[in-house]
Image (cartoon, helix red, strand yellow):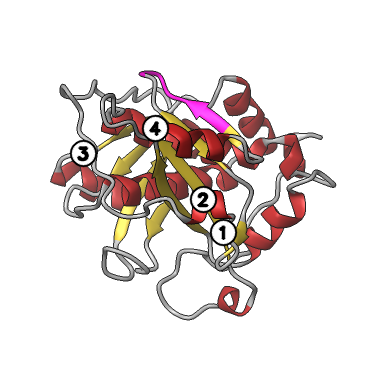
Amino acid sequence: MSSDDIPSPASESPFRSGPTDRDQAPQFVLPLVLHLEKTDPPARTDALRTAARAVLTILADERSLGDGAWAEAMRDWQDARIRKVVRRARGAEWRKAAALDGITVTGEDGAEVRVFPPIPLDGWPKELAKLQVSGTDLEDPEPPAAPDLSGPVLWLNPEVDMSAGKTMAQVGHGAQLAWWELSGTERKAWREAGFPLSVATPGAARWRELTESGLPVVRDAGFTEIAPGSCTVIADHPALRR
């Protein structure tokens, strides 16, 4: 399957806070589970990068394309609101989640995120339904390295405060918007490189420049934590810079 077979979104944004035709479609959610042991939690920035890469990985997976095993669920999900929910698991919970159909992506510093094919909003498998959805908070043990400006960067709004789980979902949205904007050749190159990317929070002045740059912007629908229409992430990819 070529990267040109990867579906693109309808022209109407899946992240609009107001009513949209996408609301009339059956609603699905993309589950992501963070491996979070009490004694060895991942660094926040690595968890964010890994969540974004997990979303890209499932978008590009052969099973998500054409007649693949996940393709129908992926199309149904992308035809509706693009919802992602991040939960956390440890010990036996993680092992049970890891046994379900999905993909585990490991970060540069060891963070682990497992992404699963989309499911109906009310159709969570029991192994995932009982996992915690709120209260996931992480820290960076030392200041993160500066982002690699020669590659893709997901910029976080410095004025919006979100939990780690919420932020993981938002950078996943940003990565997906960038993916949709790329050509087939550009998608293939990113995938073959292993989906390298940085996540960083700019200063206020740089954030204002980014909002006026024409790069893809995630405006949250406001289902959880923050106000509808909040700009949370700007997806910066070298191929999209004008």
Q: Secondary structure at mark 2?
A: helix
Q: Report the Cα–Cα distance between label 4 and label 1.
A: 25 Å
Residue topped by disc 2: 128
Name the residue located 63 percent from the left edge and 42 percent from the top edge.
59
Q: Comparing marks 3 and 2, which lies closer to the viewer?
A: 2
Q: Which badge, 4 or 1, is on the more N-terminal residue?
A: 4
Residue topped by disc 3: 202
Q: Report the Cα–Cα distance between label 3 and label 2.
A: 34 Å
- Residue 108 highlighted magenta (yes or no): yes
Q: Report the Cα–Cα distance between label 3 and label 1.
A: 36 Å
Q: Which badge, 3 or 2, is on the more N-terminal residue?
A: 2
Name the residue located 31 percent from the left edge and 28 percent from the top edge.
42
Q: Secondary structure at mark 4?
A: helix
* Left or right of 146, for residue 117: right
* Left or right of 130, for residue 100: right
Q: Comparing marks 4 and 1, which lies closer to the viewer?
A: 1
Residue topped by disc 4: 49
The answer to which quarter of the image holds residue 85 is bottom left
Q: Are marks 2 and 1 in contact (CB under 8 Å)?
A: yes
* Left or right of 152, for residue 183: right
Q: Are marks 3 and 4 in contact (CB under 8 Å)?
A: no
